[in-house]
Image: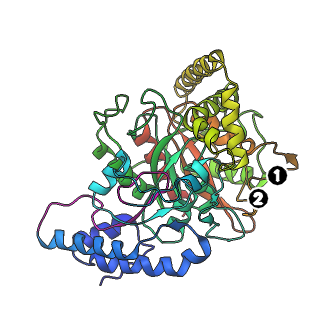
Amino acid sequence: MSDLTVDSTARQQVAAVAAREISARELMDLHLARIAERNPELNALVSLDEDRARAGAADADEALAAGREVGVLHGLPFAFKDTHAVAGWRTTYGSPLYADNVPERDELVVERVRRAGVVPIAKTNVPEFAAGSHTFNTIFGTTVNPVDPRFSAGGSSGGAACALAAGMVPLADGSDMGGSLRNPASFCGVVGLRPSLGRVPEWPTANQWESTSVAGPMARNVGDLALLLSVQSGPDARAPLALGDPGASFAAPLSGTLEGVRVALSIDLGGAFEVDDRVAAVVDQAGAAMARAGARVFGDHPDLSLADDTFRTLRAWHFQAKFGPLLAEHPDSFKQSLADNIRLGADLAGADVARAYAQRTALAETMRVFFEQYDVLVLPVSQVPPFPADQEYPADINGLPMATYLDWMRSAYFITVTGCPAISVPAGTTPDGLPIGVQLVAPHGADRRLLEIAAAFETTTH
């Protein structure tokens, strides 16, 4: 066995398996040991199946021994988000209505990652139907922060972010509507990318022609994240609006620099939302670090004043379309905040939805023009650091009360409705040591450039 550990990079782990320095079975045993050590307290992984995981690792070793062609993630242990359908594997969506659901087919993002050679071991915990940025549900309970279990791991990809940070998996997948890849990455001290619309195609889906939610990668570092994105992305005939760049274009080593990069830095997008003082301090420090590394940093921001109404309208409309009939049939089987959000959608008129789409188009144009002057926008991922795990959402920010479970997520969902790629990268901590990330945003389609800038920023924090 090599000297690899579960905290080695995913690239090191997959290279060691390919070189026969460690077997997939040995690598699986290392991860299962870490899971046994950390998961009982953290509750990040659910529907764990050790027997099937070990059998899959044995199959991976046999494939190598037989000289068969293997994928770029061959032999890596993997846990899919519990909102992603995995054939033959319990997939609950965090809802008691699906507690015994076992899909018959993989959805596209799962199909691609499985084809790349991963060995499934479990699912990662989620909030009910991935709604809300704190991971808890009535089936599995609450996922807590790997740095301090008294606090939230974020959500909806909270199980994924926590499992990554704790070394239980080397890579993780997620999805993001209002911050579900970015917020948990910030809370847990890992990296999470919300890709450009169309970068990671989704199938099956009820609406192939528009989406506020996208699938994407998570990892402990930007280079590992790029490796997973290379598997997840690329066109597919079943997804007509998928971007045409081949996934392999993200696999090459990242070689970005901050020298000469034009950075727009904003704490609150011109007073658009309240930001915890501890978060604001980390964003300021990130800007200073980028400047020291040669970036040209300016205090500036795009006008995203249309974003709040746009996001809330489209979210309610999507939720009503997707969950309205289910809520009508099972009115007592939804958490209250989600049920309220779904019912808001029932009150929308066609003019409301048309207004939201027109505003979304205007926001995309605003960002296109803004990025003629800048290469990247830097702002908070989340307006708060990790909050206590026994709260559904933070009660206030700097003493300002939060009226709903969405109010504290504006810094993430304002970017959602622009369609631009956005990545959360670890940037600092609170005085008590809780992780805080910063959000880097680039023009639509510029995912590779964003990863290069993020990788260069990552070096300033080490």
Q: Which mark is residue 395?
A: 1
- What residue would you read off at disc 2? 391
> Which range of residues does the magenta coloring cover?
67-88
Residue 99, percent across and down?
Answer: 53, 58
Give the residue type that dot 2 points to: Gln
Q: In this image, 70 relative to 383: left or right?
A: left
Q: In this image, 391 relative to 33: left or right?
A: right
Main SS type for the magenta part?
loop
- In front here: 137 or 69? 137
Give the residue type that dot 1 points to: Ala
Question: Residue most toward the front?
Answer: 329
In magenta stretch: residue 409: no
Identify the coloring.
Answer: rainbow
At x 82%, y 42%, the residue is 403
Separation of disc 1 and disc 2 at Cα? Answer: 8 Å
Residue 38, percent across and down?
Answer: 55, 77
Q: Is residue 304 visible?
A: no
Question: In the picture, which quadrant includes the N terminus?
Answer: bottom left
- In front here: 120 or 438? 120
Where disc 2 sits, the SS reads: loop
